[in-house]
Image (spheres, helix red, strand yellow):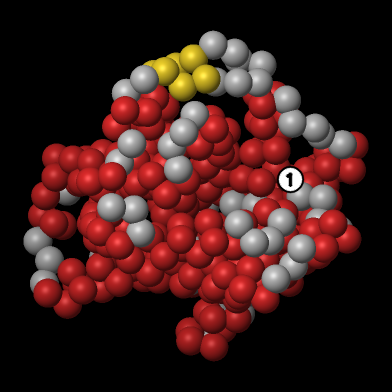
Amino acid sequence: MRIGYALVALAALLFAANGPVSIVLIDGGVSARYVVTGRLLGMVAVLLTWAALRYPEHLRLSPRELLELAFFGIAGLALMQWTYAEAIARVDIGLVLMIEYMAPFLIALYTWVLWRHRQQRAVWVSAFVALAGLALVLDVGGDAFARLSGRGLLFSVTTCLIFSYYATHASKLLRERPPQVVLGLGGLFAVLFWSVTLAPIWRYPVDVVGGGVPLGGNLGGTAPGFLLVLAGAVVGTALPFALFLTGVSKIGPTKSAIVLMLESVAAIAISWAWLQQSLTPIQVAGGLVVVGAVVLLQLARSQRPVAQTL
């Protein structure tokens, strides 16, 4: 089971590293929506190729299974990207992430109502401690509430609900298909929906991506835009999503969502090292609290090993 925690923690680190890559692309002239387009396209190309070579028998699906994966891809992948982008445009990003990472509590409640799966006390304690540490890391305070808007709050809560659905439904889908198939096909429906409705593919900024993009911060210099898009798609999206879902299949969605809080801690540390963003002692202390909560969660022994996938 420990491998499940390690897989989700590694996914969190890769997701975190993708943040500065996205910021560099956006600062270089690629809109946030088309950054998502590149990530989704790359993820689908990598994972569907992987699935076709390794799991061809799992690609034969019934219409009902295709419909289920389509809903998972559109609602769990595409719409979550949209609601998150809309939320951070209206509300402080720290507060948005705080709301999003209340998902472990919703997942635990959902699994109890639907499957009567009771979480250990250590899971609840770890979730509360990690959320408190995250508040310190993200510096959520009076300034975060100063520009609070009703629509921003609605988008933030919707992102949390979609993330809860994504993690919970993924645990069900993974009982029947490997993560490469679930994400590859789900991502295919997501990118088709995204590229037609929210970011028309025919308007993709090929000229910007084809040139050099300033790396900024401590790195300086430039890098080919297409290499940054490729890195964001493969290392920052396809691989961490596959690792996260594999982890979900081993330790369940509730614990996976708690461990994934490491993403925010790592993202701030990487942004400090690369983009020269400030890092206060309180944020460092909050990061240690989050790490401690994850360690506490990993050390807790399951009382119901047969229900680990819930």
Q: Quadrant of residue 12?
A: top right
Judged left or right of residue 137, residue 304 is left
Residue 68: image x %, image y %? 26, 73
Quickly name the residue at label 1.
291
Query: Could you say which quadrant of the image residue 86 lies in?
Result: bottom right
Percent position (x, y) of residue 121?
A: 73, 72
- Answer with the quarter of the image where residue 223 lies: top left
Is residue 299 among what the camera can see?
no
Residue at position x 49%, y 29% in the image: 28
Q: Which amino acid, by three-letter code, is at mark 1?
A: Val
Q: Residue at x 21, y 74 (%)?
A: 67
Nearest to the observer: residue 78 or residue 6? 78
Residue 153 pos. (x, y %): 66, 72
Residue 271 appears anywhere in the view:
yes
How many callouts does the rendering have? 1
Residue occupying the point 15% across, 57% down: 58
Residue 255, compared with residue 247, is above or below; it is below
The foreground one among 69 and 248 is: 69
Q: Is residue 234 left or right of residue 20?
A: left
Q: Is residue 104 above or below residue 224?
A: below
Residue at (42% x, 54% y) in the render: 245
Q: Nearer the viewer, residue 228 or 294?
A: 228
Q: Is residue 88 above or below residue 306?
A: above
Name the outermost residue toward the top: 221
- For label 1, count other residues whose C-alpha is less than 10 Å away and answer few (under 14), some (14-19) or many (20+): many
SS class, disc 1: helix
